[in-house]
Amino acid sequence: MLRVITLNLNGIRSATAKGMYGWLLRQKADVVCLQELKAQAQDLTAEMLAPRGFHGYFHYAEKKGYSGVGIYARNKPDRVEAGLGIPDIDAEGRYIRADFGNLSVISVYLPSGSSGEERQQIKFKFMERFYPRLKSLVADGREFILCGDWNIAHKEIDLKNWRGNRKNSGFLPEERQWLTLVFDELGWSDVFRRIDPRPDQYTWWSNRGQAWAKNVGWRIDYQIATPAIAAQARKVKIYLERRFSDHAPLTIDYDYTL
């Protein structure tokens, strides 16, 4: 069994202070994908760089205290690739890939457009350039699991207040349609929804109001996979018992051996 976890940390140092590593070491994960490190290499302790039993790999943002992604792997990957080779995207530390035999696991962090129109346009530009990359990965012949915070709730079931958010970043028609094309035209699979069709399953809650207490959330953290490995998914879980971030960890078990 292959266990993959994805978690937007909203700051690796903050998540560490909240006990994230004690929890993580009990999860028996094979691969852990992290987003929003908000740190550079010099900021990380030995535990953050490589928790007990794991190898750690990172793609840091150039701006201090911003973005950044990482992968912890129990088995050492055959190859690691940091960045997409697109300078302005790579400057924000949004993509890292680890290859294990015929399977690649990617930690990806799509931009948020919620801070204003300028960032929304940057998000649209990212989506425009990321789409052909997603197409080429499918054509590669390998199996892929793309983990991360995509900053898009795909359908009405994926956020509580969908009616009031139709003009807000993260639920704009253009964003949702783009994700539909990723699934329906390119053939990627929303692995969580293959297993769990229930409403009220969210991975992020605003810090405003009582969003967490009332479960007024969004499902914006995904494991999106190529069809064959997606079909091997057996169990999904959003961990809600403790909070290490404003996002919750998403764990998926696959009937697959690295």
Image (spheres, rainbow, N blue to C red):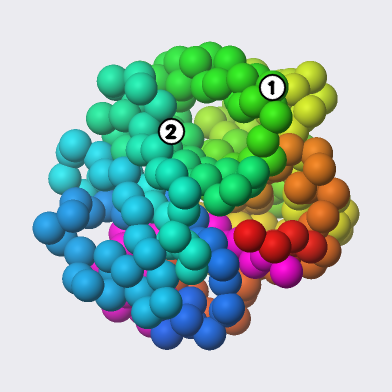
Farthest-out residue, left? 42
CA neighbours of label 1 inside 10 A, class few (<14), some (14 to 19), many (20+): few
Q: Residue at (74%, 22%) from the top-left corner? A: 186
**Residue nearest the viewer, comparing 145 with 200:** 145
Q: Residue at x 43, y 33 (%)?
A: 111
Q: Is residue 47 above or below residue 5?
A: below
Q: Is residue 129 above or below residue 83?
A: above
- Per the image, label 1 sits on a secondary structure element best described as helix
Q: Which mark is residue 111?
A: 2
**Which residue is denoted by mark 1 in the rendering?**
139
In this image, 209 relative to 202: left or right? Answer: left
Q: Amino acid at mark 1?
A: Ala
In the visual, does 51 lie left or right of 258?
Answer: left
Residue type for callout 2: Pro
Using the image as rendered, state which of residue 10 and residue 167 is in the foreground: 10
How far across and down, in percent of the image, does residue 75 sit? 49, 64
State which region is magenta: 1-20
Quarter of the image that includes the C terminus:
bottom right
Q: Quadrant of the N terminus?
A: bottom right
